[in-house]
Image: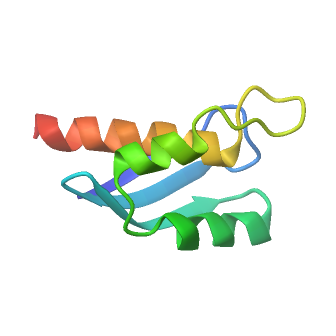
Amino acid sequence: MQYSYRTKGTCSQQIDLEINGDVVTNVKFYGGCDGNLKAIPALVDGMTVDEIEKKLSGIRCGFKNTSCGDQLAHAAREAYEASKAT
């Protein structure tokens, strides 16, 4: 299932991803730091929602209470819950 998530509190504005069961693939960030937002999708491709949350939840960017990685953890969980509801 394709899923789009509007980020909150980060330079990136949106994250698109695919979720199949609890496995996340094809992550794409829009906006933000180009290098980091190419690296994160490469590193998490094929990980489960739980693995992504374990590695990325709670990471902060500077003075912000969140980061693009943390927002990806939120996006993955939201996508998973939405896929279960359909």
Q: Nearer the viewer, residue 7 or 60?
A: 60
Looking at the image, the residue that sits furthest to the right is: 63
Q: Nearer the viewer, residue 22 or 26?
A: 22
Q: Nearer the viewer, residue 15 or 22?
A: 22
Q: Quadrant of the N terminus?
A: bottom left
Residue 57 at what x, y percent from top left?
Answer: 57, 36
Q: Is residue 61 left or right of residue 54?
A: right
Q: Residue at x 25, y 35 (%)?
A: 81
Q: Residue at x 44, y 69 (%)?
A: 45
Q: Residue at x 36, y 47 (%)?
A: 49
Q: Residue at x 81, y 40 (%)?
A: 61
Please tell me whether residue 12 is drawn above or below residue 63 in the rendered image: below
Residue 40 at what x, y percent from top left?
Answer: 62, 64
Please tell me whether residue 25 is drawn above or below residue 54 in the rendered image: below
Q: Nearer the viewer, residue 68 or 9?
A: 68
Q: Is residue 66 left or right of residue 86?
A: right
Looking at the image, the residue that sits furthest to the top is: 65
- Where on the picture, by quarter, is residue 85? top left
- Where on the picture, by quarter, is residue 66? top right
